[in-house]
Image (cartoon, grey):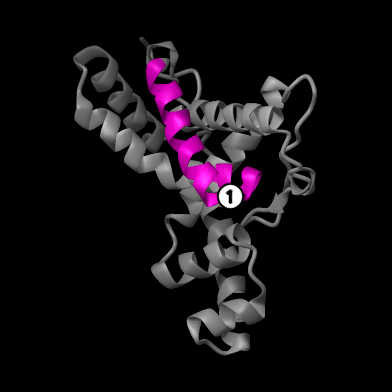
Amino acid sequence: MEVNPNLSEKAQYDYALVLRATEKKDQKAYAELMDRYQGAIFHLVNRMVFSEDDAEDLTIEAFTKAFKRLHQYTPAFAFSTWLFKIASNHTIDFIRKKRIKALSLDRGFTNSEGDQMEISVKDDGLDPMEALQKQERIAKMREVVSQLKDRYRKLVELRYFEEKSYDEISEELNLPLGTVKAQLFRARDMMAKVLESSRESI
């Protein structure tokens, strides 16, 4: 099968793992795929259900569902996009079945680029294209953050993923408030440059 030339190097590596898993039944390939995305999927799910226990269960269930359907994946788009869609849809089903009042789903959250990202629960489900676009942005955001130096990555994760205040970050990292703000500004600038120099599609 021909690989989409617009896929990033990371996405092409994921596809190679998918082939090893599906064609050779390589258990290490399955394990590596899970290791690469378990943290990101858990974070996404936890933001939707606000329960680490439920998020852990849903994360495992999402991977189980994805691996059962792995033969259906095609490299028309990134594996991460496909996986995030499965995880988000599975979690939305869980929310509906349990009738959880996840009010902040509609509020969404701000990503590391300052963009407001929303996850909405509709009666007829997420529009497929909207879901893909949102998950592509999340995956791209995480890919950019992963390229930052440790001290900057930690600040970004605390501020934008965990949504902590500047004061809370200052206290947790034992850094002056001014340093926290300055380094976050620097981190955003570096991410912007990474995005500018890497316009490839995931």
Q: Is residue 30 left or right of residue 92?
A: left
Q: Is residue 51 left or right of residue 152?
A: right
In the image, residue 195 lies at what x, y percent? Answer: 55, 50
Residue that protrudes farthest toward the front in the picture: 98
Q: Is residue 32 left or right of residue 164?
A: left
Image quadrant where residue 119 sits = top right
Part of the protein shown in magenta: 44-68
Question: Relative to 137, does residue 79 appear above or below in the rendering?
Answer: above
| Nearer-the-camera pick, 97 or 119 | 97
Q: Is residue 197 visible?
A: no
Image quadrant where residue 19 sits = top left
Residue that protrudes farthest toward the bottom in the picture: 176
Q: Residue at x 42, y 30 (%)?
A: 63
Looking at the image, how many numbered discs can be counted on the residues?
A: 1
What's the residue type where badge 1 is placed?
Answer: Ser
Q: Is residue 144 left or right of residue 128?
A: left
Q: Is residue 24 visible?
A: yes
Q: Quadrant of the N terminus?
A: top left
Q: Residue at x 26, y 21 (%)?
A: 21
- Quickly name the residue at label 1: 51
| Nearer-the-camera pick, 17 or 167 | 167
Instruction: Judge the density around disc 1: few (<14), some (14-19), many (≥20) Cα neighbours within 10 Å.
Output: few
| Nearer-the-camera pick, 12 or 40 | 40
Question: Relative to 87, does residue 159 appear above or below in the rendering?
Answer: below
- Secondary structure, mark 1, is loop
Q: Residue at x 62, y 86 (%)?
A: 177
State yes or no: residue 102 in magenta.
Answer: no
In the image, residue 96 lies at what x, y percent? Answer: 71, 29
In the image, residue 160 lies at what x, y percent? Answer: 62, 61
